[in-house]
Image (spheres, helix red, strand yellow):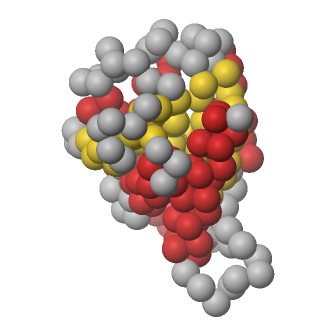
Amino acid sequence: MTTVLLVIGLTVMIWIILSVIVSQKGPEKIAIVGKSNDNQKALIVYDPDPIYNLDEKISKSFAKGLAEKGWLSKVATVAAAKNVEEEQFDLYVFCANTYNWAPDKAVRNHIKNHDHLKGKNVIAITLGSGSTTRSQRVLEELIIQKEAILIDSRVFWLMKPNDKSETKRSNIKIAVEKANSFGKQIAETIEN
């Protein structure tokens, strides 16, 4: 019985420590993807995961997909997004990690604290190990509460297969490829 309680106590303590670590806002970082003379502009906001940082890979891959269709994207961490928010964008993309069955706090707070989304085209990208249903719903609801136009919402996983027919390939590589295709698809959807 003592061993069981010890294991439960250690598990809870590790869970709390990890929750505190991942809830810290990441550094300021901006990447520009595309050409400066492109007509359409997107702002892609994420908060880097201190362990895997799949969100940066997904965000940049999505931006590269947009760039292939003639878009310029600013891929910014939550901490850096405040430096470019006064600019006008044709599309806003929020990429949120899932922690404790919810989108990460930094991205949630960023959406809650900014009123520039009303009437704007928005994409939601939810990341997680595999259990992302609630997190995706919460992220979508936050965007809708801001009276933004939620064009699409996708989920990419770290551990759960992103493509069940390709179990031999790296799941992360598959997610990055799918994000790139998603970016191309969104560019075409907005164009039409």
Image quadrant in which you'd find residue 122: top right
Residue 97 visible (yes or no): no
Q: Nearer the viewer, residue 189 or 15?
A: 189
* Image quarter in which the N terminus is found: bottom right
* Image quarter in which the C terminus is found: top right
- Residue at the spot 32% in from the left edge and 29% down from the top edge: 81
Image location of residue 38, percent across then percent down: 39, 37
Above or below, 167 relative to 126: below
- Please indicate whether residue 30 sits to the left or right of residue 117 in the image: left
Residue 96 visible (yes or no): yes
Image quadrant in which you'd find residue 8: bottom right
- Please indicate whether residue 170 sits to the left or right of residue 74 in the image: right
Total residue callouts: 0
Above or below, 110 relative to 14: above
Image location of residue 183, percent across then percent down: 57, 50
Q: Residue furthest right?
A: 165
Image location of residue 110, percent across then percent down: 43, 24
- Please indicate whether residue 170 sits to the left or right of residue 161 in the image: left
Q: Nearer the viewer, residue 153 or 161?
A: 153
- Residue at the spot 52% in from the left edge and 71% down from the top edge: 172
Image quadrant in which you'd find residue 158: bottom right
Image location of residue 50, percent across then percent down: 33, 56
- Residue at the spot 43% in from the left edge and 31% down from the top edge: 39
- Residue at the spot 40% in from the left edge and 18% down from the top edge: 88
Q: Residue furthest bottom?
A: 168
